[in-house]
Amino acid sequence: MDFQLSDIHTDLAATVDAMLGKADMPAAARAWAAGDRTAVAKVYSQLADAGVCGLLIDESHGGSSAGAVEMVVAVEQLGRHCAPGPIVESVAVLPILLRDADVTGPLNGLAEGRLATCAIAPLQPLAPDVESADVYVVSDGVLSTATVLSTEPSVDTTRTLSRVAPDKTLASGVDPSDAVDAGALATAAELLGLGQAMLGLASEYAQSRKQFGRPIGSFQAVKHHLADVAIALEMARPLVHAAALGIDGQVPEETNVSRDVSAAKVAAADAAHLSARRSLQVLGAIGYTAEHDISLYITKTRALLSAWGSPAVHRRRILETL
């Protein structure tokens, strides 16, 4: 498939990148982990004003009436800046889920930057980041608001996972498959951003850290480590974009879009995991410290590998279509 981002997409990426860069997201993420949501709430309000939160929401409900391609472009930048919170659920999953269930009331709030999260078994049985978010659950085709039963921390200090139970029924006969695919694709885009950021941090360190009077980035072994990561990320990105085109209906009718989504999730997860491992090797001991920003990216990557379906689950989905 021949696919290139248009100027609209690159401008969108640049806008989100600039907003998050000014906000010092690593500091905001640490504040979020400590229970202070102020800095992140301000950023999400700015993103909502720019139309990012409502990319998958129709204009009649306050959204941008954009598509999955625009969504993955924006979410990749959110991943690159390690933004905390239920990003995937608020920006990708619930706009699709609520639209398909014909529950349009909450869509205006989502477009305005209101956070929401959900649990949809079996791929996402626990609801992430329920604090300061509206919580939903789909069980046996029934969409409901949810009450939180218990909450546990994850390896990512900015992320929690909660067991929830149905509360008020909103719709019956709901098919969440499109929302699940949107969640897996958005997670793949976020992982791409995380992987790219870790590669950047490792490359900068390799140019400044010296051994034997030379930057360690001049050593062939280090070059190969980082080149492997760059190749993996660049091989995964077209799969993410192709799956987004599929969700937007811009592919032949016979295309298996869910398979393309699974392929994107597998490739992006593998690339981000490789970036985390190789970056940690390049940084050495300092990479193990909580004070260095790389720790935020590594732990978030580890947490997202299994979000909206583990690589093993998505490989199985691919196999079943062959």
Image: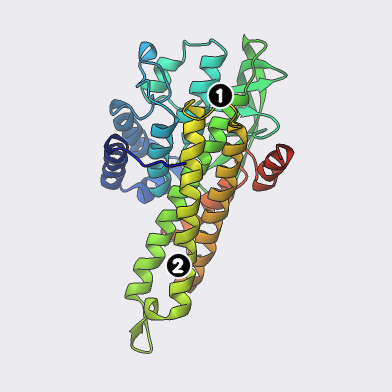
Residue depth check, mark 2 versus mark 1: number of the one nearer the observer: 2
* Residue 20, quarter of picture: top left
Residue 227 appears in the picture as rendered = yes
Q: Is residue 11 left or right of residue 234?
A: left
Between marks 2 and 1, how big is the CA–CA gap?
A: 40 Å
Q: Is residue 204 left or right of residue 179?
A: left
Of residues 195 and 299, the one nearer the viewer is 195
Residue at figure coordinates x 74%, y 38% from the top left: 320
Residue at figure coordinates x 30%, y 41% from the top left: 10
119 is higher (above) or lower (below) than 98: below
Which part of the image, by quadrant, shows the C terminus? top right
Secondary structure category for the residue under label 2: helix
313 is higher (above) or lower (below) than 162: below
Amino acid found under the numbered disc labelled 2 = Leu
Secondary structure category for the residue under label 1: strand
Of residues 193 and 321, the one nearer the viewer is 321
Q: Is residue 74 left or right of residue 132?
A: left
298 is higher (above) or lower (below) than 105: below
Of residues 96 and 152, the one nearer the viewer is 96
Residue 195, position in %: x, y? 46, 54
Residue 148, position in %: x, y? 62, 27
Amino acid found under the numbered disc labelled 1 = Val
Residue 55, position in %: x, y? 39, 26
Residue at figure coordinates x 51%, y 66% from the top left: 278
Work out whether mark 2 precedes mark 1 in sequence or the reverse, and give the earlier one. 1
Residue at figure coordinates x 38%, y 60% from the top left: 200
169 is higher (above) or lower (below) than 222: above
> How many residues crowd mark 2 within 10 Å: few (<14), some (14–19), many (20+)?
many
- Residue indicated by mark 1: 135
- Residue indicated by mark 2: 226
